[in-house]
Image: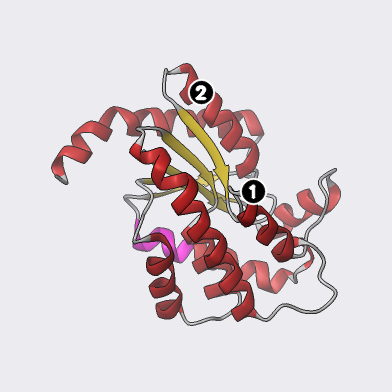
Amino acid sequence: MFITLEGGEGSGKTTQARRLCERLSEQGLDVLHTREPGGTLLAERLRSLLLDHAVESIAPETEAYLIFAARRQHVDHVIKPSLARGMTIVCDRFSDSTMAYQGYGRGLDLRLLRAMNDWATGKLTPQLTLLFDVPVALGLRRRRGGAATQNRLDRETERFHLKVRSGFHTLARREPRRIKVLDSSRPLESVAQTVEELVMNWLKAYPASTSRHR
């Protein structure tokens, strides 16, 4: 099973990803927690290039190329082999982030991004995506006021992040069966309970769902 967690800055998805992995492991599943950009040694180096404060500006197209290069490494070396071994993968960001950030946020051609993503992933798509939604002002306040080190995206304009959030909502409306939207402005424990209930209910229906697609 391939589960992804998506959302804007300060949405709390990384914390919820760790908690979800713990809960799934308690259920006896063999779970892999990974992230994008990243997941392999090379992909993590590309992540640093993407998120560290650059000496020079990064063109939107260059940003997309680096993300797809990292994703290809991740899919080839981690995701596909793990799925083949029957593992459950919980991935912090995947293709939807590219559509939201580079497509809706940066304004790159969505059709071209989808084609490049299909090429980079071999058309691999998550079975379930949790979208952690938080108002932009609150999310940025969490990131900029917390202990976490700010990255290049944290310092983007509020207008950019509003476009990203709108993009995520557009994606969710187009694929409501796969993408489930959660209000992550609520307290952490409340969000975690919703995540657990949603995923556990989905897991109960998962065998029937997969058999229908065979």
Q: Main secondary structure of the magenta part?
A: helix
* Count of residue discs: 2
Quadrant where the C terminus is found in the figure: top left
| Type of amino acid under label 2 | Arg
Tell me what residue is drawn at x 61 percent, y 77 percent: 106
Q: Which residue is mark 1?
A: 11
Q: Which residues are magenta?
A: 169-175
Element type at marker 1?
A: loop
Quadrant where the N terminus is found in the figure: top left
Characterize the local packing of mark 1: few (<14), some (14-19) or many (20 or more) Cα atoms within 10 angstroms: many
Nearest-to-viewer mark from 2 and 1:
2
Decide if residue 129 is in sight here.
no
Reply above or below: 33 against 47: above
Decide if residue 83 is in sight here.
yes
**Magenta-drawn stretch contains 170:** yes
**Magenta-drawn stretch contains 142:** no
Q: Position of residue 44 (x, y in %)?
A: 66, 53
Q: Which residue is mark 2?
A: 23
| Type of amino acid under label 1 | Ser
